[in-house]
Image (cartoon, rainbow, N blue to C red):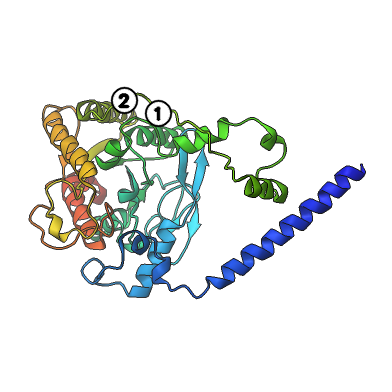
Amino acid sequence: MNFFIILLVIEVTITFALHIYHESKSNENEKETIQNDNLIERKYGARDYSQIYPDYSVEKIHELHNETYKRNFYYDPYLQFREKPFTGKHVNVSKHGYRKSPYNKNWPPNKNHFNIMIFGGSTAFGYGVDDQDTIGTKLNFFLNQEYGDRVVVYNFGCAWYYSTQERILLENILLNEVDIDLALFLDGLNDVQMFTNEPALTNNMLQLFNHANIESVFPYNTGIMRVIRKIGGTSKYNDIQYIQPDQDFDPEKIAQRLIKNHSLISSVCDSNNIETYFFIQPIPDYMYDDQYHYYPSSKEYKNKRSRFYKVLKNKIIGVDYLNYHWLADMQKDIKIPLYIDNVHYSPHMSEKIADKIFNTIREKITFINEP
């Protein structure tokens, strides 16, 4: 009994000392400028934002970047992770997982409205742009201008999501008997990134299951364990061997998987009387002038993405049973910066994509004005 009391006293003392140490370190860094705290500038260096964000102040840009890139994810048992509910000045995510806008205030959606769901990755979510400037919000604005406020867009884009996760997310939403009239998918980029067909945080999940030792009994983050690691110079994950499928980058196989996922999505939507549109998104590595891209990809990534897009374009030409729309060429003659970082769209580009989508789907909403 005395041993455990002594151990508890030691633990409390060490934890308190470590807390004081980290607080002092934090205070030393308080004078760091907002610019240095901007994760994009840390990676790429400072840039002239006047063309990327002509209507944003410098302060708003840094606030927006911090809200965008410093949020945590939320665990999901079937999707691995989702965007976590968040309330900020520029980025707001509902507890149901969609990006908030002035238009989508009600959940579940009103069955008397024409409800549109957008699925995709962080580019669909709108990383790096204000709630007011996402593709979903701009699309909702265009639709309301023509059809009134009975058309509502819900943006379920999530960082790193690709077609497999989007299919599962759609099915989960439908299991809850949510009313959907139109489902839009903005895809291309992340199916290249996740070419092994593993969600982005797979290695993080493997780490949780790869250790069953004393740290399972004596928590990893206690003061004593932190001191032991500091003295021993060891890391919890030093000996982890990531388990990845033995799969080379194969554009043909990735394109086939993307089309198969879209085919399954289309079948599910058909059985639920939901119209589907599949938009192949623009990326900076295909049909875009590099001199206007402030944050170019490495040659390896650029080559992979452009190879995949060329294969995909040829593949979907023969797929007449799916409602494909190729947006990847829309930027080829635009001579201004369109990306706020390596892959995410500027407010201007988000609006142009929303306009393209609006002019594609508007014919499906004509009945909304009928009495």
Q: Amino acid at mark 2?
A: Gln
Q: Is residue 339 left or right of residue 3?
A: left
Q: In the picture, residue 253 is in which quadrant?
A: top left
Q: Within 10 Å of the Cα at label 1, are there few (<14), some (14-19), or many (20+) other Cα atoms?
A: few
Query: Farthest residue in the left direction?
Result: 333
Q: Are marks 2 and 1 in contact (CB under 8 Å)?
A: yes
Q: Is residue 107 above or below residue 276?
A: below
Q: In this orientation, does residue 335 appear?
A: yes
The x, y position of residue 10, in whole percent, is: 80, 52
Query: Farthest residue in the right direction?
Result: 2
Secondary structure beneath label 2: loop
Q: In the picture, residue 344 is in which quadrant?
A: bottom left
What residue is pinned by disc 2?
247
What residue is pinned by disc 1?
244
The x, y position of residue 330, in whole percent, is: 12, 50
The x, y position of residue 329, in whole percent, is: 11, 47
Q: Is residue 218 left or right of residue 188?
A: right
